[in-house]
């Protein structure tokens, strides 16, 4: 579990109320439940965020730093949400959310081909749980979510989730890396590497750590980024996991991981009561076909699927 906007809202409510009792009342929670939430958040942060006393609670030094970030992040997130709600044209349109799936361009192509009368707008969100919430709440009409590991995506009633593909994770290495010439890389051989990791939420970081621990090491995360990972790899600043359909740019070698230690799922989400529900089912089939075409265009991944080696 990783820190999310809803956790920041809880911290801000506690700080403004000055006591857990008053904050619990404002949040419509029982005080023990709020205390439990605060303990969980402090465990995620790794430090105490509030000093408790007879006169209430006061932010610690670390708490003040987190609250300063929260006061900036929450309004920006709310503004983005409001702006995106206003983006839908009065006469229709299709709002799509996605979180780093390499299939997103193929999805857009399929939408434009099958639904040419729908104006397409999109927004990226690294959290697949937020994408589910946005579909359920009507903020977006369709979502393409990427999920790390074999976990099942929990969706509320009324939201349809259809898997498009499950694929292995490959590793991106600098072109001059000692393992760049290997047909497949054993994860244990990367134990001393500097890792470049996306700060995506929803437990992906936990899945990554568990995978590394299962191979006998704790990963050394040198760069925590949401973009430019490929440039950092090409610049020999570390290694990172990538989707197997990723094209290999200059300066980088993409190789399979022996034994497929970590898989990724691509899932399409939409509301069952949406006016385009029947077209979304057709769209799912088209996106699945687009994924197969993406695989066919990548000789390395195709060879891995055919022979178990690149």
Image (tube, rainbow, N blue to C red):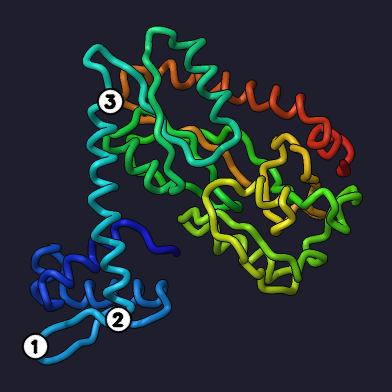
Report the quarter where the C terminus lies. Answer: top right
Does residue 119 sit above or below 238 in this rendering? above
Give the mark nearer the N terminus: 3 vs 1: 1
**Neighbour class for label 3 at 10 Å: few (<14), some, many (≥20)?**
some
Q: Position of residue 119 (x, y in %)?
A: 37, 15
Horizontal and vertical percent position of residue 131:
39, 41
Which residue, as the protein is rendered here, is positioned at the far front?
Answer: 235
Residue 42: x and y, percent? 35, 76
**Residue drawn at the location 90% of the way across and 51% of the way down:** 182
Label 1 Cα crowd, 10 Å radius (few <14 / some 14-19 / many 20+): few
- Tag 2's secondary structure? helix
The circle drawn on residue 61 is 2
Q: Confirm or deny contact between disc 2 and disc 3 (CB under 8 A).
A: no
Q: What residue occupies the far bottom of the structure in this picture? A: 54
* Badge 2: residue crowd in 10 Å (few <14, some 14–19, many ≥20): some
220 on left or right of 4: right
Name the foreground residue: 1 vs 239: 239
In the rendered image, the quadrant that contains the N terminus is bottom left
Q: Is residue 285 above or below residue 207?
A: above
Q: Which residue is mark 1?
A: 55
Cα distance in 3D space between marks 2 and 3: 40 Å
**Element under label 1?**
loop
**Residue visible at 53% across and 17% down in the picture:** 110
Q: Residue at x 38, y 42 (%)?
A: 132
Labelled pair 1, 2 in contact (Cβ < 8 Å): no
Which label is found at residue 87? 3
Residue 145, horizontal then vertical, whole percent? 49, 40
User: Which residue is at the far top?
Assistant: 117
Q: Helix or strand or loop: what does disc 3 sit on?
A: helix
Q: Name the N-terminal-most of marks 1 and 2.
A: 1
User: Which mark, by number, is residue 238?
Assistant: none
């Amino acid at each position: 579990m990783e820190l999310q906007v809803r956790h920041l809202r809880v911290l801000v409510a506690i700080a403004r109320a000055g006591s857990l009792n008053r904050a619990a009342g404002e949040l419509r929670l029982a005080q023990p439940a709020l205390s439990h939430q605060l303990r969980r958040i402090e465990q995620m942060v790794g430090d105490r965020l509030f000093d408790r006393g007879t006169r209430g609670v006061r932010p610690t030094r670390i708490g003040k730093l987190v609250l300063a970030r929260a006061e900036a992040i929450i309004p920006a997130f709310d503004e983005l949400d409001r702006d995106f709600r206003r983006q839908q044209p009065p006469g229709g349109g299709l709002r799509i959310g996605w979180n780093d799936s390499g299939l997103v361009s193929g999805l857009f192509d399929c939408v434009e081909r099958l639904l040419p009368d729908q104006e397409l707008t999109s927004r990226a969100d690294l959290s697949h749980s937020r994408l589910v919430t946005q579909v359920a709440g009507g903020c977006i009409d369709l979502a393409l979510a990427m999920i790390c590991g074999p976990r099942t995506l929990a969706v509320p009633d009324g939201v349809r989730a259809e898997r498009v593909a499950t694929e292995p994770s490959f590793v991106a290495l600098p072109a001059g890396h000692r393992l760049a010439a290997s047909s497949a890389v054993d994860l244990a051989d990367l134990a001393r590497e500097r890792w470049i990791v996306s700060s995506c939420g929803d437990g992906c970081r936990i899945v990554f750590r568990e995978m590394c621990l299962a191979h006998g090491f704790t990963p050394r995360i040198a760069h925590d980024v949401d973009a430019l990972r490929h440039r950092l790899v090409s610049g020999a600043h570390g290694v990172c996991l990538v989707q197997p359909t990723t094209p290999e740019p200059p300066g980088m070698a993409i190789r399979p991981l022996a034994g497929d230690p970590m898989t990724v799922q691509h899932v399409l989400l939409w509301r069952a009561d949406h006016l385009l529900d029947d077209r979304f089912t057709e769209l799912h089939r088209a996106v699945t076909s687009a994924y197969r075409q993406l695989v066919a265009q990548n000789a390395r991944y195709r060879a891995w699927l055919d022979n178990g080696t690149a």
